[in-house]
Image (cartoon, coloured by chain):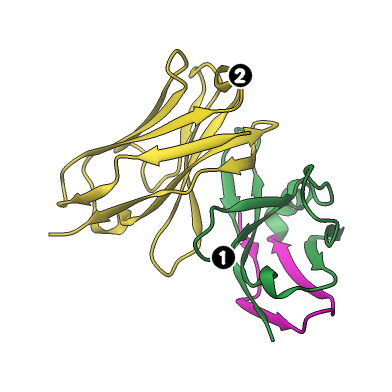
Amino acid sequence: HSALTQPASVSGSPGQPVTISCTATISDSNSVYYISWYQRRPGKAPKLLVFDVNNRPSGVSDRFSGSKSDNTASLTISPLQTEDEGDYYCGSYTGNSVVFFGGGTRLTVL
Amino acid sequence: QVQLVESGGGVAQPGTSLRLSCAASGFSFRTYTMHWVRQAPGQGLEWVAVTSYDGRYIAYADSVNGRFTISRDNSEDTLYLQMNSLRLEDTAVYYCAKAKYEKVLAHWGQGTLVTVSS
């Protein structure tokens, strides 16, 4: 069974970088190669920030960047802005288009 | 630009049915895979179902398999989710999403709230 583990919360100060991790279970470590990151701000529709680990869709700020090390993917926001506060989800998929998400990380801007 | 507008949510009793719709515009709907995703109160995102661009390939989350049916009308640029045998745990905001490369959820609607309550 596929699983992605995220920290429940992270925080940072405006102007500083913050990183959110997403760890794939060892039994499904290949899923880390297909990680996407989604932002869910209050009152807003979810938004795709990064796909396939480190690709940004057009129109997404270059303050958002993705990376991978072993079975852990990461989203870095730098520099952090107050408007970045919200929930962040990593997601991946299986070969038959089944999508699954991590549990989400609440980002607080101090 | 891409626009997805969900409708059809509301309050339903356990065991009853609802049908959600997602009206698409701003892109060639008939050429894209589409997904439904939900978020229960205080919970994270949960993927629900996917349909290929032509409706020939469909898959469901285990939690809804056998109760929910995803479909699409490419002549009307509309995606549907028929929800039968509703349970309390189906209470959530339901989002439709346009896929990129079939499995990346590139654009999302604002969602429609489904409340299952007796």
Which amino acid, mark 1? Answer: Gly
Q: Is residue B59 above or below residue A16?
A: above
Q: Is residue A85 above or below residue B55?
A: below
B8 on left or right of A79:
left
B58 on left or right of A103:
left
Classed neighbour count for the residue bearing mark 1: other residues with Cα under 10 Å, few (<14), some (14–19), many (≥20): many
In magenta stretch: residue A14:
yes
Q: In green, which chain?
A: A
Which amino acid, mark 2? Answer: Thr
Give the foreground label among 2 and 1: 2
Q: Is residue A93 above or below residue A44?
A: above
Q: In yellow, which chain?
A: B
Residue at the left extreme of this rendering: B118
In magenta stretch: residue B27:
no
**Residue found 62% across the figure and 34% down from its top:** B99
Q: Which residue is mark 2?
A: B31
Residue A103 disc label: 1
